Structures are given as structure tokens and as C-alpha cells.
Image (cartoon, rainbow, N blue to C red):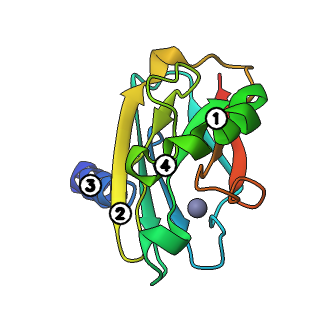
Amino acid sequence: MRFAPLVIVASLFAAGSAFAAGPCDLEIEGNDAMKFNKDSLSVPASCKKITVKLTHTGKLPKASMGHNWVLTKTADMQPVANDGIPAGPAAGYLKAGDARVLAATKLIGGGESDTVSFDGSKLKAGEAYSFFCSFPGHVGLMKGTFTVTK
Ligand code: ZN
């Protein structure tokens, strides 16, 4: 069994490439049916940096079916969405300097993607967070829970 250690190393490399993203790197998709492909996301509390990649898998332009990925406390979600509408598309339908916004990607159209990275220490395990799209009218369908696990 003298080759056993080599086999173990090789399989670790294989597992590493299969899960290269890691628990602090999340991916989510939005589509032309005004839906995210996930209704919940979670990260371990140990994440120093959290990265979320949003991909718009549809074909419609940003002006009619724009999507972003915005993270707030659950209690702040609807007020942030409401307050973002007058900010307009150039601001990604988010009020400038809104401290309730914990993280947000750019507003994107079909075929585009954007990634946001933020400091995991801003989040607390046990707090109720939600993610949503702040494009006017999308928050009703495009939202989900974001959990920080111990
Ligand atoms: Zn949207």
C-alpha cells in the first residue's frame, strides 16, 4: 500500500477543482421570467469575504427586464426597494448611499453578469437577511432568504 498516499493527494486535487468556488462564493441566476433560480442562499459565519455572482440568463434588455442582486436585512427589503425606484436605472434603482444596502451588484440585462464582493464580518449569524432585485416591480417575485450559519 505504499502508493496509497499518492492516491489520496490526487483525489484531494480532484475534489478541490470540483468545488473550487468554496462556501463563501455564491452564484445565482435571474431570467426573463422575472425569477431567480434560487430562493435561498447561505454562507458560514467564518467567511471573511463573500462573493456573489449574478448571471442574467435571459435575452431581454436591462431597460425592460433588468436584474440586480441586493442584500439587506429582511425588514429593510421592501423599504429599500420602494426608496430605490425614484433613483432610476442609472443608479441601479437604489438610493445613493443607502446604508441599509449591505451588498449589491450592478443592474444587468440579458446575457450579462456581475459579481459583488463584501466583508462577511458585516453579517451576523441568526439575523434575518434577504436578497432581492430592486428593478421596479421585481421584488415581489425576485427575492429569497440569506442565512449566515454558525
Ligand atoms: Zn429583476
Which residue lies at the image location 29% right of the left edge and 54% below the top edge?
Answer: 4
* Closer to us: 86 or 78: 86
Query: Tag on residue 88?
Result: 4
Mark before the other along the chain sequence, 4 or 1: 1
Q: Secondary structure at mark 3?
A: helix
Question: Which comes before the other along the chain, label 3 or label 1?
Answer: 3
Residue 84 x %, y % = 58, 40
Q: Amino acid at mark 3?
A: Phe
First in residue order: circle 2 vs circle 1: 1
Specify which label sits upstream in the sequence, 3 or 2: 3
Q: CA distance from mark 3 to mark 2?
A: 28 Å
**Marks 3/4: CA–CA distance:** 46 Å
Residue type at tag 2: Ser
What numbered label is drawn on residue 13? Answer: 3
> Of circles 2 and 4, which is in front?
4
According to the picture, the residue beneath numbered tag 1 turns out to be: 83
**Label whose residue precedes the other's in the sequence (3 or 4):** 3
